[in-house]
Structure formats: C-alpha cells, structure tokens
C-alpha cells in the first residue's frame, strides 16, 4: 500500500484489537498464578489518535537528537518502538511522581499508562498479516532474580496481557546472562548478538524488548542502478561508496529540506530526508517539533523523484540512563523512584541499554533492535509535470515507517561513510 489515509488517521481513531493474553506470542511461564482480582482483558479497543501519533514522533525526535553520537557527527540508528515497549512494561509497576514522569514522556496529553498499554499493544498486534518478504517481529521478556520472591502477580499479568511477555525466574548469574542474551540474539535474528555484557547479582529485574525487521524493496535496485559515487561526510571529507538510484513517486519537502519515500514489499517504507545544505543534521533536528516531523510525512506529494541512496550498515549502542533523565524521566533512576507496583521492596532503574543494527542494500533492509531495562534496589494523484531529484550524498536523516499507522519503527542518521 503506497498511500495510506494519513489525514484520516490523524483526525479519527483507528480501532486496534487483539490485545488479550491469547496472543500467539505469549509464552507459558513458571511464575505465581495471578491474583484472583486480575480480570481477562479480551479484545480491549485502543485508539492511536492524532495526539498519540504526534507523541510518538516527538519521542523519536527527542531520543535521536539527545544521543551524543548524533551531535558529534556519528551514524546513529534507534528504535523508539523498542524503547517504548521496554519502558511501557516498566511503567506498569510505577507509581506517584515516577509514574507521572513516565506517562508524560511516553504517552503525554494527560493520558495514563493504561492508555499506553492499549496503544502499544494495538500497534504491535494490529498490523495486517505479513508475508515472508516483509516482516516486523517483536518479542518481550522479563527476568526476575531467583532470590526475589515478591514481584506482584498483577504486574506480571499486565505485561503478559498487553506485551505477551515471557517471564523467567532464576538466580542472576552467568546462566541468567546467557538466557537474556540468547533471547535477544534469537528474537533479533542474530542482528543484536547480545544486549548485556554483565549482570550484577544484586539486580532484581531485567525487562527486555527485541525487534527484527526484514523487508525487500517493492522494486529492488538492478545492477545498472548501482554506481560508485561520492558521499560528503559531516567532517567535510568524502568517500566513494555504492550509490543506488531509482524512480520514486512520493516527494517530501518542507522549509528547504527535501526527501522521498521508498516502499518495501509490504506495509512499510523508508523515508530519506536531506536537510538544507546550510544546516547540519543536528541543527536541523534541533529546529524540528513533533508536529513538523509528522507533517513532513503527512505532506508528501505524488511527484516523480529521481532518488539516490547509499548502501550502508550501522551498529548503535547507547546507555539511555544518561539520556532519559534529560527528556523528563528523572525520578525512575533515583532513590526516590516509586515502583511499588512491582514489589514492596524499594526499586529503581539502574540501566537502560539500547542496541541496534541496520543493513540497507540493493535488495532491501534488515534491522534489529533490543532494549533492556535493568532494575536494582535502592504517508490518487495525477502525474507531476516534472521530476524532482533528491541525492542523499551528504549527511541525512532516515526513518523506517509502519505505514499502516504511519509511525516510526526506526529513526537514524547517516553522517559519515
């Protein structure tokens, strides 16, 4: 589907279903039975309205521009989709100021963690059926230190219902570290081989999300469309790299920035955005608002585009515990954290580790992402009259979009090759 009803989606709610514990992704677990008062969710409806869409773009934008490697001219690729799911699971155990800050950051608009659960569950399960040429696989898991017996069944139930989270209880030793990393390696199809290098025995809980994206271009590049070309890096140097040129039909333009959408063989698209020549990637990102980033995609026009894209690969590893507090989520990392919804014991977030990998080639794109929260105590038109040209031969921003909901699954920069 090349053009979805973005305008309608921004004005009317999309009904999302299938969020109950009956998801085929759910795993049997050897954890205590839920308390009797926990009820079945069934097909709870969720509506990712205009506010949720803007909030998602805002979270993706702030996450990208708050990452130090972006400012320093590095190549960065993040998955706001992955980070939000890991934090969404964690937020189910937050209370007081901790919960309020997480709600403001993750869902906004005066909405609650319950609203976040429904929206993220709907996003995860509400996509159309995918064939083998285009898949987005998601898995969630929770590891509990075997010496910790007081994790509330209601917390686990919420995360099984809304996130289909596997739950594992074991001592936090080398075997637990191997279990977590093995889960991430398997669920990202090997693109993220490990998420944690160590696991302290004093940690109480690890919440993990893993994502694997594998998509073929709707029109793969032919050999005749791939030629060596020069890419100008952020530091002014240049490098000769394989450049892929094709004809696209969705043109992006806003305040001097130009770009295009290139579709995969499914409900996803690659968005390449080239900032104005007088602005660095960081300066352009700093000038954006969630609404303006949304509107770049929403305002696409049906126009022939001669689009050039470099082949590239990137690996990113970031410690989000140094970034999320700057985005407004301070209390969760302090001794004042309130995660009484998880356990009567005092808990706080110690680490949030996020790792990604992406390969963009002539055939398509493979991308993986994983996020671990470690907790411890204390986008029908007529043919355009002319052809636009967009050549991504200098630093640019890109997104991989779920075109059913027009939401960013991945967002990144290429500033050097």
Image: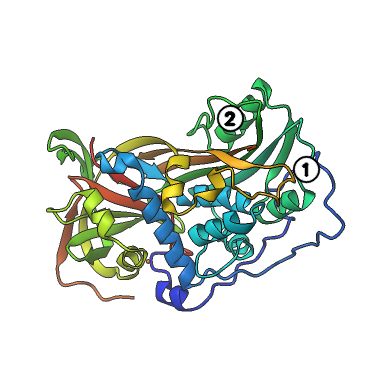
Res 100 → quadrant:
bottom right
Few, some or many residues within 10 Å of mark 1 (<14, 14–19, 20+):
few
Q: What residue do we see at 54% from left, 49% from top? A: 331
Seen in the picture, residue 110 relative to 236 is either above or below; the reply is below
Residue 154, percent across and down? 76, 53
Q: What residue do we see at 59% from left, 72% from top? A: 15
Mark drawn on residue 28: 1
The reply to whether dot 1 and dot 2 touch (C-beta < 8 Å) is no
Q: Nearer the viewer, residue 78 or 27?
A: 78
Left or right placement of residue 150 versus residue 408 in this view: right
Q: Which residue is mark 2?
A: 181
Residue 238, percent across and down? 13, 35
Most extreme residue toward the top, as rendered?
174
Residue 326, percent across and down? 41, 49
Seen in the picture, residue 19 relative to 226 is either above or below; the reply is below
Seen in the picture, residue 305 relative to 10 is either above or below; the reply is above
Give the quarter of the figure containing the C terminus: top left
């Amino acid at each position: 589907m090349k053009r979805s009803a973005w305008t309608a989606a921004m004005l009317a709610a999309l009904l999302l279903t299938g969020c109950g514990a009956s998801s085929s992704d759910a795993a049997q677990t050897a954890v205590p039975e839920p308390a009797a008062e926990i009820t079945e969710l069934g097909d709870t409806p969720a509506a990712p309205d205009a506010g949720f869409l803007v909030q998602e773009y805002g979270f993706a934008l702030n996450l990208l521009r708050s990452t130090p490697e972006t400012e320093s001219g590095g190549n960065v690729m993040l998955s706001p989709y992955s980070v939000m799911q890991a934090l969404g699971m964690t937020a189910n155990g937050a209370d007081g100021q901790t919960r309020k800050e997480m709600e403001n950051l993750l869902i906004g608009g005066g909405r609650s963690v319950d609203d976040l659960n429904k929206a993220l569950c709907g996003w995860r399960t509400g996509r159309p059926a995918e064939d083998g040429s285009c898949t987005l696989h998601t898995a969630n898991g929770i590891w509990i230190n075997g010496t910790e017996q007081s994790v509330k069944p209601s917390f686990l139930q919420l995360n099984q219902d809304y996130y289909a989270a596997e739950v594992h209880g074991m001592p936090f030793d080398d075997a637990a570290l191997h279990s977590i990393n093995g889960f991430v390696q398997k669920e990202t199809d090997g693109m993220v081989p490990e998420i944690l290098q160590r696991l302290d025995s004093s940690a109480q809980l690890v919440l993990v999300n893993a994502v694997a994206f594998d998509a073929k271009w709707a029109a793969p590049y032919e050999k005749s469309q791939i030629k060596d070309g020069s890419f100008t890096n952020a530091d002014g140097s240049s490098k000769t790299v394989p450049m892929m040129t094709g004809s696209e039909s969705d043109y992006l333009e806003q305040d001097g920035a130009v770009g295009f959408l290139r579709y995969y063989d499914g409900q996803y698209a690659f968005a390449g955005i080239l900032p104005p020549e007088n602005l660095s990637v960081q300066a352009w990102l700093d000038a954006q608002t969630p609404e303006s980033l949304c509107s770049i995609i929403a305002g696409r026009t049906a126009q022939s585009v001669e689009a050039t894209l470099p082949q590239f690969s990137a690996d990113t590893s970031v410690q989000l515990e140094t970034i999320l507090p700057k985005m407004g989520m301070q209390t969760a990392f302090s001794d004042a954290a309130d995660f009484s919804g998880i356990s009567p014991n005092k808990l706080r977030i110690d680490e949030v580790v996020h790792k990604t990998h992406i390969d963009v080639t002539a055939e398509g794109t493979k991308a993986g992402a994983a996020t671990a929260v470690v907790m411890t105590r204390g986008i029908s038109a007529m043919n355009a009259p002319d052809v636009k040209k967009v050549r991504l031969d200098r630093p640019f921003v890109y997104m991989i979009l779920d075109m059913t909901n027009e939401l960013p699954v991945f967002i990144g920069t290429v500033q050097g090759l």
